Image (spheres, helix red, strand yellow):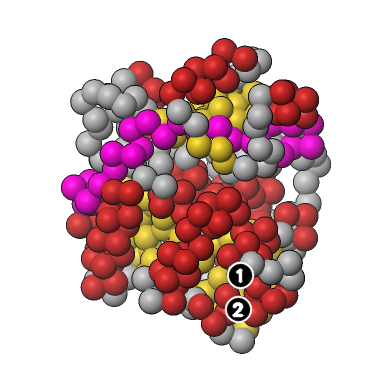
């Protein structure tokens, strides 16, 4: 009997989300649609310049853990915060979602991570992230019983930026595989892929990672091709299962020579794409860890992603289990 369905490992980040126009991005040297890593001084500067904002506990894998819990799944999380105000907010929020979060906080500096997210009128989000306490996540934060007790461990590619987190990931993956469990990752964004392409491919080809989540930009970046079809043909060979999202085109899931084309969820209005990929992963993994077929896993992912992009913030306000039952997916 497994203790958890999904163990998520990621950067524990408080999102500070505000609307902006395109000119604001240009004037402040912000790369649109990317996750830009910044230092403490720039974090302070951008915070002073941004308009009215919403604060929400985020971080890619944290959003996925919250999504799994909203579906009624058993989720756990490893992530590092500091024992400051934002750290307390983050800890309260993720536990209130029903996620087991027991990583010991830092006693002092650096402070809890925060990401200034600017949402332009087209719904695209541009993230400016100060990693803060995140960089202190290390092997000592791995809880072996959770690593061995989760059906699937899921981690974010962003964790390849802080070096000690890599050791924690590899240790967790080893414990998981030794217990007969599976490991999955998200490529996070195409700029992250550019930084760590060779390492990501090694993780996949070595069998460290069984399931890969990506969007169409990330998979093309991974294989340095402009052709989605070429990239899809290559990733079939490199991992056991790949789930690739394509925005309004839905998603494609491949396993060996099998292909499942998944339709997007119809939406009333695109408000904010923050968390779309994270919530897709939560739906897919909830279905997968409960033995559902891959097409239904994709439909659950589409449902969760479609709901979250119609609101501000990365964690859906609706109960995902209720929403899935309404449309007959669970």
**Which of 62/98 is in front?**
62
Question: Is residue 14 shown to the viewer in this render?
Answer: no
For disc 1, the marked residue is 223
Label 2 crowd bin: few (<14), some (14–19), many (20+), radius 10 Å: some
* Quarter residue 97 falls in: top left
Check if residue 141 falls in the magenta segment.
yes
Highlighted magenta segment, given as a residue range: 119-143
Which residue: 47% across, 40% down? 59
Which residue is painted at 52% across and 74% down in the image? 241
173 relative position to 32: left or right: left
Q: Secondary structure at mark 1?
A: loop
Percent coordinates x, y for residue 258 in the rendering: 62, 83
Q: Is residue 131 visible?
A: yes
Q: Nearer the viewer, mark 2 or mark 1?
A: 1
Q: Quadrant of the N terminus?
A: bottom left
Identify the element where label 2 is drawn: helix
**130 in the magenta segment:** yes
């Amino acid at each position: 009997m497994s203790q958890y369905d999904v163990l998520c490992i990621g950067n524990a980040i408080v999102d500070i989300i505000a609307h902006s126009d395109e000119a604001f991005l240009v004037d402040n040297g912000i790369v649109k649609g990317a996750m830009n890593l910044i230092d403490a001084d720039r974090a302070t500067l951008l915070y002073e310049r941004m308009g009215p904002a919403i604060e929400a506990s985020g971080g890619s894998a944290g959003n996925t853990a919250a999504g799994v819990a909203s579906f009624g799944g058993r989720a756990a999380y490893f992530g590092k915060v500091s024992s400051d105000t934002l750290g307390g907010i983050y800890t309260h929020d993720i536990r209130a979602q029903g996620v087991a979060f027991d990583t010991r906080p830092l006693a002092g500096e650096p402070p809890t991570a925060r990401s200034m997210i600017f949402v332009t009128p087209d719904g695209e989000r541009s993230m400016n992230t100060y990693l803060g306490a995140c960089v202190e996540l290390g092997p000592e934060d791995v809880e072996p019983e959770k690593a061995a007790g989760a059906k699937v461990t899921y981690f974010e590619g962003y964790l390849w930026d802080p070096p000690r987190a890599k050791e924690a990931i590899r240790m967790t993956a080893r414990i998981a595989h030794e217990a007969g469990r599976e490991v999955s990752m998200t490529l996070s964004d195409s700029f992250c892929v550019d930084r760590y392409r060779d390492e990501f491919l090694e993780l996949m080809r070595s069998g460290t990672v069984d399931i890969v989540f990506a969007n169409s930009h990330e998979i093309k970046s991974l294989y340095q091709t402009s052709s989605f079809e070429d990239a899809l043909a290559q990733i079939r060979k490199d991992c056991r299962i790949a789930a690739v999202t394509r925005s309004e085109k839905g998603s494609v899931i491949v396993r060996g020579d099998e292909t499942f084309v998944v339709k997007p969820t119809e939406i009333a209005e695109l408000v904010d794409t923050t968390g779309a990929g994270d919530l897709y992963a939560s739906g897919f993994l909830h279905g997968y860890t409960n033995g559902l077929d891959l097409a239904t896993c994709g439909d659950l992912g589409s449902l969760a992603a479609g709901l979250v992009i119609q609101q501000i913030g990365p964690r859906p306000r609706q109960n995902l289990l209720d929403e899935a039952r309404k449309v007959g997916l669970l």
